[in-house]
């Protein structure tokens, strides 16, 4: 149950962020079909008061999700808690990447001139298939090596010492 609540809530928040970014990006496409619909939605969603209301609602839903997870975790077996802790660490890093991507994407629309063009170029590189997968690979490799170094500091080396008896 804990895994289902965690994965379902995380997927819902991630889909919401991707949908909001897609509405804003498609609204820029211009006239015709989906561009008109996205522009009308973006004109309503991305105004100051509506963005503040949406942010407060999103924070409230996130806190409610965390409270639900804590309540479910109290009744979950230990193996499931361990499994979800590992999943949380991975999702935090993915969320961090998407948060940086969303911030850069938002700065494309909020900044004008040269800074906006630089932000658009960075967002393009960050979201391209090759660079995104490579960055996830190198971030994962860095985290794996860092985790191993920290574990060795706290737990010590795992070398086994074998004592030989002299049979002289």
Image: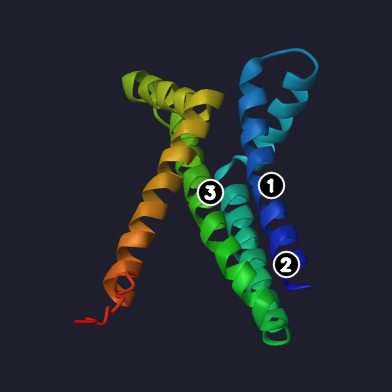
Image quarter in which the N terminus is found: bottom right
- Quarter assignment of residue 6: bottom right
Instruction: Classify residue 60 as left or right of residue 122.
Output: right
Distance from label 2 to label 3 (Cα)? 17 Å
Which residue is label 1 attached to?
16
Sequence-first tag of 1 and 2: 2
Q: Residue at x 67, y 65 (%)?
A: 61
Tag shown at residue 94: 3
The picture places residue 103, in percent across and down from the top left corner, at 46, 41
Query: Residue tagged by mark 2?
Result: 3
Q: Residue at x 41, y 53 (%)?
A: 144
Looking at the image, which is closer to me, 33 or 138? 138
Q: In the visual, does 158 lie left or right of 88? A: left
Kind of element beneath mark 3:
helix
Q: Tell me where residue 154 appears, x and y as whole percent.
A: 30, 75
Q: Position of residue 63 (x, y in %)?
A: 61, 71
Secondary structure, mark 1, is helix
CB atoms of marks 2 and 3 within 8 Å: no
């Amino acid at each position: 149950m804990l895994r289902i609540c965690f994965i379902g809530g995380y997927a819902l928040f991630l889909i919401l962020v991707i949908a909001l970014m897609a509405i804003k990006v498609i609204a820029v496409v211009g006239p015709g079909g989906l561009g008109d619909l996205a522009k009308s939605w973006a004109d309503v969603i991305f105004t100051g008061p509506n963005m503040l209301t949406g942010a407060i609602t999103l924070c409230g839903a996130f806190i409610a999700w965390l409270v639900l997870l804590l309540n479910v975790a109290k009744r979950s077996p230990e193996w499931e808690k361990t499994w979800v802790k590992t999943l949380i660490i991975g999702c935090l890093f993915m969320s961090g990447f998407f948060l940086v991507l969303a911030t850069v994407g938002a700065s494309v629309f909020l900044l004008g001139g040269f800074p906006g063009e630089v932000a658009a170029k960075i967002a393009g590189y960050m979201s391209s298939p090759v660079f995104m997968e490579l960055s996830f690979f190198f971030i994962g490799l860095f985290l794996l090596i860092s985790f191993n170094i920290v574990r060795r500091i706290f737990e010590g080396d795992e070398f086994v010492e074998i004592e030989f008896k002299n049979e002289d």
